[in-house]
Amino acid sequence: MAKKKLTKKQILNRAKKIKLLLTDCDGVLTDTGVYYSHNGEVMKRFSVRDGMGVERLRQLANVEVGILTGENTGAVKSRAQKLKLNEVHLGALNKAEVLKDILQRRNLTPEEIAFIGDDANDVEIMKMVGLTACPADATKFALKVADIVVESKGGYGAFRDFAELIIEAKQKGENK
């Protein structure tokens, strides 16, 4: 059964509370494509617009960003380093356990965490945090539980769409 969708006002109210935005990698930061050679995985495609979303969240909304993914590749590590992320959890087979650790270690509540994911392995964590999103081309599993389905596809600005929504909410909250 699909989750009851939130109103724009409810979404903005939840977004105002966010201190950390966690993202899956493949299908959110990438377009799900993986390029292989005879040596194995070589490349993944990332959007520079999503990278700007990370910087805008830091500068305009004081929101940190982290990656929480089952992937453990050099491309993802390189992207996390380029974006200067402090919360980087690669090879996370149990995302819920990693989230519990983050909450305890950073003294955060679930309502202060947002997550954007795109597939079945993201559903559990999506049920545990304050605000969730998925790309327009997410699987039916993520679409059912996400609070927001952003306009862009994974790897083509989906993360940025969600980041801008959080920035908007934070800025409106300051201007009250």
Image (cartoon, rainbow, N blue to C red):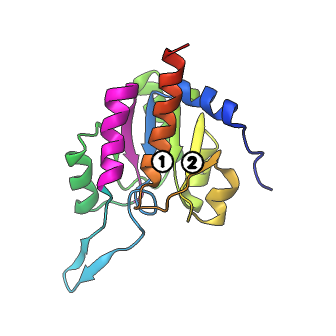
Which residue, as the protein is rendered here, is positioned at the far top?
Answer: 176
Residue 37 drawn at (x, y percent): 22, 84
- Describe residue 109's horizontal placement relative to residue 37 as left or right: right
Q: Quadrant of the C terminus?
A: top right
Return the residue nearer the eye: 82 or 126: 82
The mark that comes first in sequence, 1 or 2, is 2
Q: What's the CA distance linking mark 1 and mark 2?
A: 10 Å
Q: What predominant SS class does the magenta segment belong to?
A: helix
State the residue position of label 2.
133
Say which quarter of the image contains residue 6: top right
- Describe residue 3's horizontal placement relative to residue 174 as left or right: right
State the residue position of label 1.
161
* Residue at 39% over, 57% down: 29
Q: Can I make out residue 87 in this image? A: no
Which residue, as the protein is rendered here, is positioned at the far bottom?
Answer: 38
Residue flagged by tag 1: what amino acid is it? Asp
> Magenta segment range?
48-70
